[in-house]
Amino acid sequence: IEVEHYTREEKDEMIHNNMEYVLFSWLKQKGINPLNIDYAKGVYLYDYDGKRHIDFSSGLMNVNIGHGNQRVTEAVMRQMQKVSYITPSCMTKVRGDLGKKLAEICPGKLNKAFFTLCGSTTIENAIKVARLHTGRHKILGRYQSYHGSTYGVMSAGGDPRKLSADSQQAPNFVHFDIPTAYRWPYGEEALLKEAVLHLERVIAFEGPENIAGILLEGESGSSGCLKYPVGYLKKVREICDKHGILLIIDEVMSGFGRTGKWFGFQHHDIVPDMIGMAKGLTSGYIPFGCLMVTEEIAAKYDDVVLPLGLTYSAHPVACAAALEVLQIYEDENLIENAVKMGKYVELKVSEMQKKHPSIGEFRNTGLLGCIELVKNRETKEPMAPFNARPAEMAVMNQVAAKIKELGMYTFVRWNYIFVAPPLCVTTDEIDEGLDIISQAIAIAD
Ligand code: PLP
């Protein structure tokens, strides 16, 4: 890989001085001590001191094809040479080609693409479209879900980090709970019943005639890969149909092969009314997002402008990156590999579980996985609680520090360690990564 290497002085300048000009620098957060990354290739990041770090969270679960794929660089350059920006009111060939490709990938009548900038702007627009389409105002979302950080979606999500961060919640978002099997003592059947009854009660109290949409992740991601009860999404689909509520599935993290299928909801045998996409759409090479909606929803806007304007909507360079990335998924059989490697991870972690009493549960779908650490396997008391105070994070911080010291980059949050490497990962690389995690978990045992 051809990269421009900095001198030691330049590196020091960058790390110690220029960072002062960054508005929000992790450097100033005690104990975080960020990596300074020089370049990246495949599943590896290389820091300014030449140390290699295996990337076990694919950046932020977005670099699905792996780092440094020159095909994307070249596609981006070719597009930039032609036209690097054009307003969304003009058409480009790449935009149409990408829309067509996504319509082919998506099931049913999900054939109309609205291109956005990232995950948050995608879900913001899903909410707007749901309200415009139904004439209703409320959006229902899951506690412990994450849909982004802009004002509306921050309120739509039920992530405790965001709920507590913002005392000015946007109105008309309602949260409901979906219990998960790990801490449910009464069996699968009762779990499904309870989850469905609870949702029906919330809908009855809020008034179905007021509810525009139910927003759910295709497979839950950053809140800890919390699984849906078996059959739950099918029931939600039925409930939505009964009340004329739109089902919006957020595939920002679970999309594009991450779970071993194009989309996470495809594990649940449903077809939503809208799909939110970002991250894996361009594999993080360029910020981008897309909202796919059904032909029925889009029909209204055949002769009326959809009032969702964004300056960078359908950015041609991002469209070119996405088209190339989608081709790479197919050419390199990455989705098939995610299935195989996901199974391999399951096997290896189940072996690790015998050795480490602090592994409570490993939850994954394909390569979207996380290891949950507990203080005690019987009581399932988490190693650090949701919304943990700094003192409660002491052990997890040590685990995270060890992971980093041993040459791994991954997401460690609350009592979770994420296992979500790029989809091009090999069994040797998984062994290397899990060995690091195993050494770190030993601290918690
Ligand atoms: N939706 C889900 C499910 C996500 O996981 C994320 C980001 O992690 C988002 C939305 C927000 O995406 P972005 O950070 O690109 O705005």
Image (cartoon, rainbow, N blue to C red):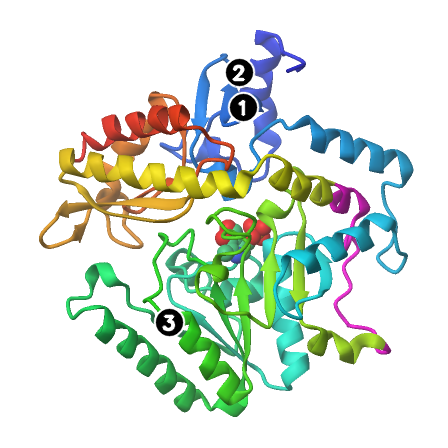
Do the residues bearing badges 2 and 1 touch, measured as CB atoms within 8 Å? yes
**Residue stretch in magenta:** 303-320
Residue nearest the observer in this picture, 287 or 193: 193
Q: Earlier in the sequence, mark 3 or mark 2?
A: 2
User: Rounded to the nearest whole Å, what is the CA distance between mark 2 and mark 1?
Assistant: 6 Å
Q: Which mark is residue 48?
A: 2
Q: Is 318 a magenta residue?
A: yes
Can you tell which quarter of the image residue 22 is in? top right
The tag earlier along the polypeptide, 2 or 1, is 1
Residue 175 spot, x, y in % from top left:
41, 73
Q: Quickly name the residue at label 3.
A: 232
The residue that mark 1 highlights is 37
Q: Which quarter of the figure is the N terminus placed in?
A: top right
Residue at image x 18%, y 30%?
Answer: 442
In the image, what residue type sits under mark 2?
Answer: Tyr
- Coordinates of residue 220 in the picture (x, y in percent): 42, 57
